[in-house]
Image (spheres, grey):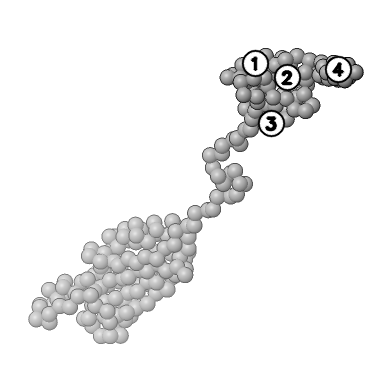
Amino acid sequence: MRHTTALSLLLGSALVLASHPGFAQSATVSPETSAYVHDGNGPVVRSQDGLCWRSGYWDQNDAVTGCDGALVAPVMKASAPALVADPMIASNEVAPAIAPKQCDAGVTLASDQNFSFGKATLTKAAKQRIDQQIIAKLANCASTDLILVTGHTDRLGSEAYNRKLSLQRAGNVASYLKSKGVSNKIETAGAGASDPILQCSNKLSRRKLVNCLAPNRRVVIKMQSN
């Protein structure tokens, strides 16, 4: 009686397996080339519902008879996200703008850019220096809050005369800057002979003394940003 019951159970199990769509056919694939999970070197491992277990590398081209059809994969194929060249684009962030250059610079009109004795007229060389060192730089600056122009003289003449002359020299430089389209705030000052950069002997002849003191007859231009 026990043998008859056991035989009946085995036959019933065989009929159930044969009727299940996942077991209708055996999987015919070599473990070495298979994209499925294998039991050692044996057959494809199946779930309790009869589905073949797929590896993470499985795709539709790896499907075999007896495992696939309209089955849903119990293990989805792993895939890496597409690479993005710019990490800012990947995170939808805007790249920070490069801050414009701040300008704090000074220029001293010297050598052949100096003023003639007793004169406030800009030389051609002085204008070229202003064009190259001041106006060209202003075009590339974020902002220049102030342009300070200070005139200087040599020590010959009275203090009042030299202060007036130095202010005239600064004023002519400021006028030239404005004539070139500079709209920044400009302040002028006259230092007279109070800040010499060269001392000359009084034993020199008048002509030689005037020539020796030439570097003191100058204008200093400073660009300042807060």
Q: Residue at x 64, y 16 (%)?
A: 29
Q: Is residue 136 above or below residue 5?
A: below
Q: Is residue 129 above or below residue 88?
A: below
Q: Which mark is residue 182?
A: none
What is the C-alpha distance between the residues marked 2 and 1? 10 Å
- Residue type at numbered disc 1: Val
The answer to the question of whether label 2 and label 1 lie on touching residues, with beta carbons closer than 8 A, is yes
Sequence order check, earlier mark of 3 and 1: 1
- Horizontally, residue 118 falls left or right of residue 12, namely left
> For mark 2, what is the residue?
67
- Residue type at numbered disc 3: Met
Sequence order check, earlier mark of 4 and 1: 4
Q: Residue at x 44, y 59 (%)?
A: 101
Element under disc 4? helix
Sequence order check, earlier mark of 2 and 1: 1
Element under disc 2? loop
- Residue type at numbered disc 2: Cys
Tell me if mark 4 has few (under 14), some (14-19) or many (20+) residues whose alpha carbon lies within 10 angstroms of its own. Answer: few
Q: Is residue 224 above or below residue 38?
A: below
> For mark 1, what is the residue?
29
The answer to the question of whether label 2 and label 3 lie on touching residues, with beta carbons closer than 8 A, is no
> For mark 4, what is the residue?
3
